[in-house]
Image (tube, rainbow, N blue to C red):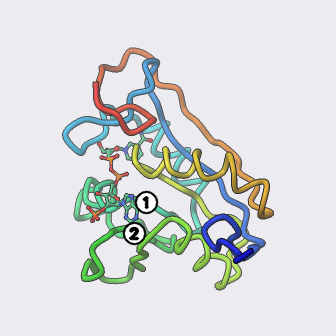
Amino acid sequence: MEENQDLNPAPTSVRIAIIAAIGKNHELGRNNELLWHLNEDMQFFKETTVDHYVIMGRKSFESIPKKFRPLPNRVNVIISRNPDFMYEECYTCGSLEEAIELAGVNEEPLAFIIGGGEIYRQAIEKNSWMKCFSPWSMRLFMMLILGSQNSITSNGTKN
Ligand SMILES: NC(=O)c1ccc[n+]([C@@H]2O[C@H](COP(=O)([O-])OP(=O)(O)OC[C@H]3O[C@@H](n4cnc5c(N)ncnc54)[C@H](OP(=O)(O)O)[C@@H]3O)[C@@H](O)[C@H]2O)c1
């Protein structure tokens, strides 16, 4: 039987973590912006991800105010289906797998998936079957924000 590369990715030693701040109804953002601007949340995010790879969807990257992107002191990896998408000092990858492979090839020990909804959903879905085939081990860092409003949910749907 021919080996299915999609179901059997090259083993990588990079550990993967998801970091997200979610509201009590699993909301993440609205109109391509965060729903909250909390110093505590920002500080936690910065301290946790500094010096690591941060992997994000193109929309999340564009949701970061221009003066703060690319996120400093981190390797910014943007996932896009558009092969022409480029941004200075950033990597662009065509899939989550490609982004993780890049981190592995560059010997990053711990890469963070930082959003948004589409990318979180894919990461969780892939991990549920990929852990059978590869040594990915996924950790979750989550801030629960109480008192937020409805918007895009953590599974990529909008409400
Ligand atoms: N609360 C939090 O912790 C948190 C964290 C991050 C973001 N957010 C919020 O989340 C929202 C954005 O989330 P979102 O779900 O709309 O978008 P997203 O996940 O950030 O990005 C979606 C984009 O990623 C690319 N993409 C997705 N799947 C792909 C695949 N399999 N292969 C290649 N490229 C792929 C596509 O880019 P192209 O269209 O260029 O092809 C797609 O349009 C914003 O409101 C943001 O503020 C919240």
Image quadrant assignment for residue 4: bottom right
Q: Residue at x 40, y 48 (%)?
A: 118
Is there any visible trace of residue 87 in the rendered image? Answer: no
Question: Judging from the image, what secondary structure is the residue with disc 2 in?
Answer: strand
In the image: residue 16, left or right of residue 76: right
In the image: residue 133, left or right of residue 78: right
Question: Residue beneath label 1, please?
Answer: 56
Image quadrant assignment for residue 101: bottom right
Numbered label attached to residue 64: none
Question: Judging from the image, what secondary structure is the residue with disc 1 in?
Answer: strand
Against 63, residue 10 (above or below) is below
Is there any visible trace of residue 119 in the rendered image? Answer: yes
What count of labels does the image hold?
A: 2
Question: Residue beneath label 2, please?
Answer: 78
Rounded to the nearest whole Å, what is the CA distance between mark 1 and mark 2?
A: 5 Å
Ligand 1 under 8 Å from disc 1 Cβ: yes
